Amino acid sequence: MKIGEGFVGDGVNAAHINVVLGHRDGPVGTAWATALATPREGHVPFVAVAQPNMPIVPFTLFVNKAAIANDRHGVLTWGGAQAGVAAGVGLAHTEKLFAEKLDSLVLIVAVWVNPSADNEEAVFANNRDATFVALQQARDAGPDIGQALVAMADPSNPYFRAT
């Protein structure tokens, strides 16, 4: 199982991606199928596509972390963010991030699109880049432990900074 995280952009159009990549016949495959079969109010996982009738390879389950707040938020989530995830996974193929054949795996992508997002191109680009960063981190089995320890000693994020 490979796990990664990516955060790209700032403001309302930033993207925050979490990925879990694993074998179809392993625990990630079980989690993938279970999540698809058990949607919750506001969170309906779906098979992500690069184009209609063309699923992303590996089969990718898109899970929205923010409940769809309005029509525009839905369009940005299912439009720009989904296309960005497809492009980020495509980039992982192009850059040969994984030696293993990705079509034997499944991918779960948890995607944050801010309900206040307002720029489809920025949502697309940020989700593409965040997906790629998350997959790079997954390939590397997580962040460098030394860098992680330094960051954990002084945690901050776009919503909080200790004073």
Image (cartoon, rainbow, N blue to C red):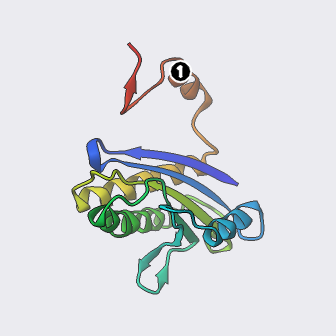
Name which quarter of the figure residue 75 lies in. Answer: bottom left
Quadrant containing the C terminus is: top left
Q: How many marks?
A: 1
Residue under the point 53% across and 59% down: 109
Residue under the point 43% across and 53% down: 66
Judging depth in this view, the residue of 80 and 69 nearest the camera is 69
Q: Is residue 43 left or right of residue 160?
A: right
Residue under the point 38% across and 54% down: 129
Judging depth in this view, the residue of 66 and 100 nearest the camera is 66
Residue under the point 77% across and 70% down: 25
- Tell me the kind of residue under disc 1: Val
Quadrant containing the N terminus is: bottom right
Q: Is residue 129 above or below residue 152?
A: below
Q: Position of residue 94 (x, y in %)?
A: 46, 66
**Tag 1: Cα neighbours inside 10 Å, few (<14), some, or many (≥20)?**
few
Q: Residue furthest top?
A: 163
Q: Position of residue 24 (x, y in %)?
A: 71, 70
Q: Position of residue 81 (x, y in %)?
A: 37, 62
Q: Is residue 119 left or right of residue 30?
A: left
